[in-house]
Amino acid sequence: MSLRARYAGGALAALVVAGAVAAPAASAIAGSKRHEVAVIVVPRFAPSAYAGRGAVGWLIPGAGSTVTRAGALSSLVRGRVVSSLLGGASKGDPVIALSRQPAEITVYVALPPVGGSGNVTRYPIAVVGGGYHGLLRSRSTRIDGLVSIADIAPSVLALRKGHTPRIRSRISTDAPAALERLDMRLRHAHDARTLAIVVLVASVLTLAGFAQLLRSAALSRAALLAIPAALTTSFALAAVSIDGRLPATALLTLGTVGLALFAGRSTRALLPLLLAFLVAAVVALAIWPDINALSVIGPHPDGGGRYFGVTNEVETLLLAPILAVGALVGASRIPLVAALALLVVGWSRTGADGGGVLVVIAALAALWSFRAGFMWTPRRIAAAAVAAGALGLLVVGVDVVSGGSSHVTDSLGKGPWSVAGEIGHRLHISWAGATATTQATVAIVLTLVALAGLALIRERSDAVDTLLVALVVSLLVNDSPTDVVAYGALVAAALRTWDDLDLSTRGRRRFAALSPQVLPVLRRR
């Protein structure tokens, strides 16, 4: 079978399997008639108090590292959350009002105490009446038992109009016990996250350092494979419910280093292994979003930012296997690599990261141009930027036509001004995050200086230069600049080491592809 056929077959298989298995389950709430709905704020309660006559769950009261009661109340009545970096309070006219008396369907919700607190505590929510029983579930979180405070107002409005609400329920034999387990696993994932990142960074840099010291091609492949190995091990540990800080850290270390060393022994196995990882990522993200959410390297549902799919951090890490695959195939096969990569980051069933779509398109388009010997000029760069944006809209449009639904498709459905507003909002959050503390600002500046130095090295690499293009785009369309540049530097170290010691001259760019108008410093010596 040809390499092209294997790419197409793998991507098609992932799409068919994930689409068949991950079809949304039937809701317990038909939403076929209008209901009277009341929302009552009550003191914190045990889920067992309402489990016998309704559905219960945990509520994430805000987005970001901190939350206030005032901010949670503003989100509750307006149906949207604002990052704590921007104050945490939602503005505009309320769309629902709080009640004092129960109704046909009553939402009982507890909120954070007066003042500010860390956004690491979940608060109980119960819905009584209207056929709600068991565990609450929401298409915004895709985690049974967990809902966002922004889900409440849209669900109330939908029920009042006779439409299907965002918050529904599913039968559970012991909902309080299930919520207790969920809360414990979310706590453990939060506690283990910092150590998991230390393991990832230390594994990649250690393997890359020894590869350079020993001039070992096998170790350079291991340094590159350490990133997908860490993501795979993290997911596997969540799948078998190993999430305690010490056990998870120890097993993550063994899994990352062991898998990377074992898989890096053969040059011939590298491309099939990287392709298998990307296909497996499509299937896993589509079928088991809750397991991905509970991984120590993955979404941060406890902080209310992203509940499933690919975060900006993971998106940046995924550039390592994506660009490595692109570097190993010819220019004519790069569009097939792009199709598979866009399934990972852009399909609504895998999380629909709109920024990730643009980053992947820009990265692989740049890689194709380098390999094809395309001459870049300022005018062509501007045209390419417009074309990348149009292609991104096309990808999301195809997702909508095929039945996909996500925050990206919702934003696109509101028109171009909504998309522009979303990008502006992300830039605002990015700036607020980058300047929140002196430490954050210094870290970003130093990392950018290091990446700029890498960009000025005279001995060029297609994979690394493509990564730099992707990071520039990511800083413009995503809202986590600190993570993007930090993880980008890690990926750059892995790609550069692998390119130097294993990919060799196959990864060197033809310098004629660069116009002297764009980067004269990179002319061939």
Image: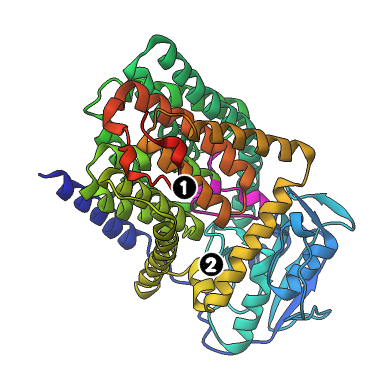
Q: Residue at x 30, y 27 (%)?
A: 503
Distance (Cα) linking label 1 and label 2: 22 Å
Question: Looking at the rendering, in which quadrant would you find the N terminus?
Answer: top left
Whether the residues at callouts 1 and 2 have beta carbons within 8 Å, the answer is: no
- Tell which of 328 and 346 is nearer to you: 328
Q: Circle 1: is it few (<14), some (14-19), or many (20+) Cα within 10 Å? A: many
| As drawn, 277 above or below 54 | above
Q: Can you tell which quarter of the image residue 422 is in?
A: bottom right
Q: Residue furthest right?
A: 114
Of residue 108 and residue 68, the one placed in the foreground of this image is 68
Q: Quadrant of residue 191?
A: top right
352 horizontally vs 186: left or right: left
Residue in front for this viewpoint, 341 or 182: 341
Q: Tell me the amino acid under the disc marked 2.
A: His
Q: Secondary structure at mark 1?
A: helix
Part of the protein shown in magenta: 290-312
Location of residue 440 in the rendering, given as x and y in whole percent from the top left corner: 72, 39
Write the residue at 31% across / 41% down: 512
The answer to which quarter of the image holds residue 384 is: bottom left
Q: Find disc 1 in the rendering and name its residue.
A: 470
Residue identified by numbered label 2: 407
Q: Is residue 189 visible?
A: yes
The secondary structure type at the circle numbered 2 is helix
For image coordinates 39% across by 9% down, the residue present is 214
> Picture coordinates of residue 283 (x, y %)?
35, 51
Number of numbered discs: 2
